[in-house]
Image (cartoon, rainbow, N blue to C red):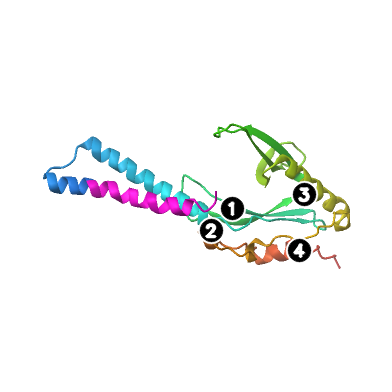
Amino acid sequence: MRGVGVWLAPFNFLLSIAFPAILIVYAVTQHRAPSLSLVLVGLCVCITALWAGMYFWKMDTEAPRDEPIRFNRARRKVYVYRFRHNGLKPFSRSAWGARAEVYDWDNLHAEACSIYGAMGSGGSIQTVTLAVLEPGTHKVVDRFHFAHDIQQGEMYWAMAQLFMQQGPQALPSFPRPPRDWNNEKIRFNLARRLAPKVHWPEAIDLESRSAPSMPG
C-alpha cells in the first residue's frame, strides 16, 4: 500500500483549507457570520484533514526504504534499524525517524501472532515479532517487527538461531545475492523515491560488523 499516502495527503491539505475558505466566502456574500455550529464543524474538518494529510505524507516519505536487522555472533548482539512514528504527533520531528537500537541476543524471544482482521473477505493477519525480555525474567520490555507471515518468520528465526549458534557455515546457500533496497531502481512509486536510504550511525555500523577487540 505504500505510495497511496503521497496522493491522499494533497487531497487532505486542500480539504483543510477548502472548508474555511467556503465559510469566508459565505460570510462575504451573505454579509453575516456563519453559525457557531458551522464554524465548529469547519474547525474540526480543518484540523482532522490537516492531521491526516501530514500523517499520510510522513508515513509514506519518512519511513526508510528498509528496516534491516544485523546479527553479530561474536558480540552476541542484534542491531535493529527501526522506524518510529507517533500518529498523535504528526508535526513532531523527535517522534518520527529511523533509529538504530542494540539488543542482547540472549534476551530475544520470537512471538507468532494471528489476529482476525476485519477485511472485505475476512481472514487472519499473521505476524512474527521479536520480544526483548528483561534479563533473567519473562517480562517484555520492547518488541520489534520480524516477519509478516508466521511460516516466513519461523524460517528466518531458524536461520538466525543457526547463525548465532554455529556460524555462517551452518546457513543454506542462496542462489541470488541479498536485495539491496538502497540501490533498488525505483520507477513509478513516488513514496519510495522520496524515502530516505538506510544509513547506520557510523559507530554502530562499525560495531555491528566487527568482533570485540581482545584485551592486552
Magenta span includes 11: yes
Q: Earlier in the sequence, mark 2 or mark 3?
A: 3
Q: Give the residue drawn at x 85%, y 54%.
A: 171
* SS at mark 3 in the image: helix
Mark 4 — residue?
A: 209
The label number, if any, that marks residue 105 in the structure image:
3
Left or right, 204 with respect to 160, comes to: left
Task: Point out the tag, 2 or 4, that comes first from the N-terminus.
Answer: 2
Looking at the rendered image, the disc whose residue lies closer to the viewer, 1 or 3, is 1
Q: Quadrant of residue 214?
A: bottom right
Q: What secondary structure is marked by label 4?
A: loop
Q: Is residue 149 above or below residue 116?
A: below
Instruction: Between label 2 and label 3, give the one nearer the viewer.
Output: 2
Q: Which residue occupies the foreground of this view, 182 or 33?
A: 182
**Depicted 216 relative to depicted 35: above or below:** below
Mark 2 → mark 3, Cα distance in angstroms: 36 Å
Q: Residue under label 1, please give it.
A: 83
What residue appears at the point 13 percent right and 47 percent down from the top-left corner? 29
Q: Can I make out residue 91 in this image? A: no
Question: Is 130 within the magenta?
Answer: no
Q: Nearer the viewer, residue 199 or 187?
A: 187
User: SS class of the residue under badge 2?
Assistant: loop
Give left or right: position of 61 versus 165: left
The vertical placement of 71 against 187, above or below, is above
Where is residue 73? Give x, y as percent: 82, 56
* Labels 1 & 3 near each other (Cβ < 8 A): no
Rate crowding at label 3 as few (under 14), some (14 to 19) or many (20 or more) other CA atoms within 10 Å: some
Q: Tell me the crowding category of disc 2: few under 14, some 14 to 19, or many 20 or more residues within 10 angstroms, Cα based.
A: few
Q: What residue span does the magenta drawing correspond to?
A: 1-22
Mark 4 to mark 3 CA distance (whole Å): 15 Å
Tag 4: Cα neighbours inside 10 Å, few (<14), some, or many (≥20)? some
SS type, badge 1:
strand
